[in-house]
Image (tube, grey):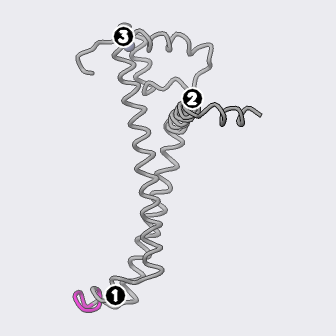
Amino acid sequence: MARTRCTDRVVGAILASWRYDISGIYPEMRKDYEHHFAECAHCSARQKFHRSLDATLAVLTSLAVFFFLFALAVLHHIKPLEHVAFKVFGLDIFDMYHMLVSAGIAGLCFSVMAFALVLMATPAPSYLGGIAAERARLIEERLPAAIKALRLR
Ligand SMILES: [Zn+2]
C-alpha cells in the first residue's frame, strides 16, 4: 500500500481528508471520485482499509456492549465472586457486589456511547449493509429453482 502512488495528488488529498468516504456527497458530484477510485490503486486500497477499520470498530464496540450485558446478567443471577471477595480479599460481600455492578453499568454505558459514535461518525452502517446485501444476493443465486419460483410470487 505504501509503495503505490496516487495518480492525481489533488483528488487524492481531498479523498484523504474525507477518509476516502464519498457516501455523503451528491451522486452527481460522486462520479469523478468513483472514476478516480477505479483508476487509482493507491486510493482504492486506502478506501478498503478505512472501511474495514470502520467495520472493525463497529464490531468491537458492539461486542463490548454484549460482554458488559453478559457480565451484568452473570452478576444478577449468580454471585461467583462471593467466596473470593470474602475469604481471600476480606471484603464485604455487599460492597464487592455493588462495586462490580457499578463497574458493569459504567462499562455498558460507555460501550453503548462508543458504538453510537462509531455508527454516527463513520460510514460503517452503509458499508456493513452493502456487504450484507451482497451476501444475500450470492445466497439467492445459489438457491434451487423451485425455491426461487416461490420467492417471485
Ligand atoms: Zn488516488
From this view, report whether residue 87 is shown above or below residue 25.
Answer: below
Structural distance between the alpha carbons of marks 1 and 3: 62 Å
Structural distance between the alpha carbons of marks 3 and 2: 41 Å
**Residue placed at 48% from the left, 50% from the top?**
115
Callout 3, which amino acid?
Answer: Arg
The residue that label 3 is drawn on is: 9
From this view, report whether residue 4 is shown above or below residue 46.
Answer: above
Residue 4 drawn in magenta: no
Callout 1: SS: helix
Which residue range is magenta in the image?
85-90
Q: Earlier in the sequence, mark 2 or mark 1?
A: 1
The residue that label 1 is drawn on is: 82
Callout 3: SS: helix
Q: Nearer the viewer, residue 115 or 80?
A: 80
Q: Nearer the viewer, mark 2 or mark 1?
A: 2
Q: Quadrant of ligand 1?
A: top left
